[in-house]
Amino acid sequence: MFDDSNLIVGLEIGTSKVCVVVGELNAEGALNIIGLGQAPASGVRKGEIVDPAQAEESVHYAIVEAERMANVEISHVYLGVTGAHIRGFNNRGIHRVLAADHEITDVDVQDVVKNAKAINLPVENCIVHAVRQHFFLDGQDGITNPVGMLGSLLEVDVHVVHGVTNRLQNAVRLVKGLHLEVDEIVFNGLASSLALLTNEQKELGALVIDLGGGTTEYVVYVNGIIRHTGVLAIGGDHVSNDLGHGLKVSLSRAEKLKCEHGAAVVQAASKGHTITLAHELNLPARTINHEHLQRIMSLRLEEIFQIIAEDLEQAGLLDYLGAGVFIGGGGARIPHLAQLAESVFKAPAFLGQTNSISGLKSALDQPEFLTAIGLVKYASLKSRRRPAGGFLSLLKNQFGRVLSLFF
Amino acid sequence: MNPAVDPQIPARETTNPPVIKIIGVGTAGVRLLETLPAADFTGAARVAVDTDAAALTASGVGHKIQLDNRLVHGLDTGGDAEHGRALTEEQYSTLKAAGAGAQVILLVAGLGGGVGGVITPLLARAARETGSLVLAFVTLPFDWEGNHRRDQARQDLKQIRAQADGVICLPNQKTFKLIDENTGVVEFFRISAGLLTEALRGVWQLMTRPGLIQIHLADLCALLRDKNSEAVFAFVEAAGSARAREVVEKLLAHPLLEEGRALAESDTVLVNLMGGRDLAMGEVNRVMEQITRQCEHARVIMGASVDEPLKDRLTVTVIAARHGRPAVSGDAATSRSAHACPPPRETPVKPHAAGGRRKADPKLRQELLPLATISKGRFDKSEPTIHEGEDLDIPTYLRRGVSLY
């Protein structure tokens, strides 16, 4: 087996599917996808685990498949988390620069970020991410790295994503039960947005919607930074459930109808058209109105988008989607979804395609793998930020920092 | 009405009716204003506000205000809300002058277009700034008028709710159920306009006619004041010996009241009965008994008056308001759609079997069937996803009342 320090693995325990993506960092630090694993998930509802034993089995299958494909042994993973309990908001931290020469150092930056993270959360909640946005130096906006600049008052905006600790830990415990280390937990929406968006799109302003099985995550970037995140505990499961109820068919049948005949917008061709169901357990064949099927789907999907649009409008971000709306997740397979999104958000909409990573074509083409790919990307960005070259250079770096304090 | 004949009924001169202005906004609003019968609204100052010079000239309303700028050229805004908004901001002082001097201002508008829905909120704000009480009577577009108009109308409604003291809203789509499908188009619009006129008349009479049991203006304001409240309105009349029973039946079958469900879910219900001189106490009692039985949880404000020209007819005006607050329990959440004005609720289930009532109702009734819990399917046992009081686990098409059959 190779040295696995360059191996990064993203694991997403979704409501309908467990996805594992194995990535490898080459010598230049570029990411390459070398393995995939997936298994139908059971014991997960609305993005959260409701039956650990069943879910553990699904995760196990997916991991084994990925190991086999990449021919590696997976020992630690980046774990994607979601759920209706996850919230995001913006907070500002303030720090007064005390040094006599008013030069801003790394320590000042760390302090101000620490201040920004000091928020009143409910006791049962913990921070998943505190993403740094822009710095303000004496009120001057738009500073991305203030180290070395002069000023007396340093402020920073952070976007804080937080969730209920116990509910987050449920997934972590499950993974640990499989003798895997969890490097970090990452909010699924954030991961998807990393996989989908280029830097330019983040600058222009973009909305990423990850339409999953049980939950829909959304993230808004404006001016290159995360401005808004949210989770809606509605997803493809709800579409199937609506179909099952409306067309009076079983859930599995509804799921199948959704995949084979569904559309996000009622198609002219489906009007008056019927679908004949094959025999099922000797029951007589039935016909189903194609238009009703699509109308039920369309209403549900439109509602999801409308709720997101309302939320963005309240946050005042709806007019900033210059690059448009990007849709990922299994829901992105629904035909004409982009058309529906365009009409709701009144912005160009695209079905998500990962462009920023090389590797297995089969992985990059599947919208379901978006989050898991994003997790790997997140990890690669993390490791790039970390000093490369192991312990010695780390020591040198630290030493250099100490020296710079004196001179 | 002659005070000498019946000392119980105070003469109109002794009461001091408030100064009321009725302002029609936009094409729909101005047209509605014209259709208001003059005899019923004596003493009201009517004002027409529009951008379309031709439409204003054609209208017979005395006081006209035309909003104009270079963008519009004295024409209609063509449904462009941005135009309407820019125009109104420009001419805010004109709008303020339009409402000046009135104690109560009734705004009439059709939402979803470029004028009515846009100017009305600003007009409401202007009027409130001059110290008037503002009630808005608005119509929502038909479903077939398209998504754009529907969304626009919803936004407009939100805006108006934020500005006006009270909003009474009539979704045009619901009038379909009220009117026979074979009705001619002209006739249809006349009836539809008539519904709004009835609402106006009902409120008008509340404010101006002295009653045996008086409903004060303050009561009406209290009913409609809550910014989040949603009010539905119904007006029925019947004649003949069985009129008391008939009005109750009509009320409970009224589409705007969701076959009586709206009453059950209301927090405050205002009922005004009007009859000819032969209005009997027994009838008042019978009607009120039936209505209060429908809305046991609500505060009922009741009024009754005698209006001689009605002769043997009995009319009942009902305004049911439900205060906005996040509902948590499943059935309370579904009930929201009964009041939320846009599209009507048509569950595939028979009307009387459907409908969530609030819990803690000890009496067993057919309406109590817990429809909501059935339709949640696989999400039956999971944590509900509540958004603004709606349980999103219930299929959207059910909550929006889209009929599939």
Image: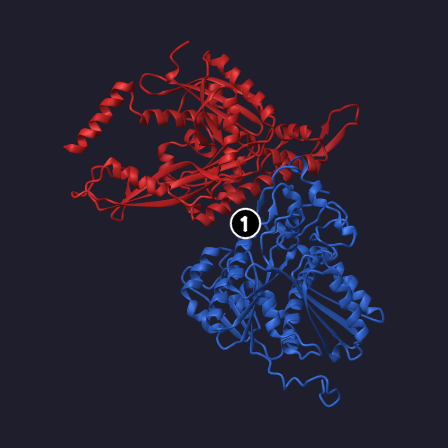
Chain colours: A red, B blue
Q: Position of residue B178 (x, y in %)?
A: 72, 58
Residue nearest the viewer, comparing B105 with B380: B380
Q: Amino acid at mark 1?
A: His
Q: Residue furthest bottom?
A: B4
Give the quarter of the figure containing the N terminus of chain A. top left
Residue nearest the viewer, comparing A156 with B43: A156
Q: Is residue A249 left or right of residue A154?
A: right
Image point 71% across, 47% down: which residue? B347
When asked about the image quadrant of residue A102, the answer is top left
B318 vs B41: above or below: above
Image point 40% across, 44% down: which residue? A119
Q: Residue furthest right?
A: B241
Q: Position of residue B65 (x, y in %)?
A: 49, 70
Q: Is residue B72 left or right of residue A155?
A: right
Q: Please rate how many residues cluster around mark 1, counting C-alpha atoms within 10 Å: few if below 14, some from 14 to 19, many from 20.
A: few
Q: Secondary structure at mark 1?
A: helix
For mark 1, name the chain.
B
Give the quarter of the figure containing the C terminus of chain A. top left
Residue nearest the viewer, comparing B21 with B293: B293
Q: State the residue position of label 1.
A: B148
Image point 39% across, 25% down: which residue? A379
Residue A367 appearing in the image: no
Q: Is residue B8 left or right of residue A322?
A: right
B129 vs B358: above or below: below
A261 vs B149: above or below: above
Residue B290 appearing in the image: yes
Q: Position of residue B109 (x, y in %)?
A: 57, 63
Q: Position of residue B198 (x, y in %)?
A: 67, 68
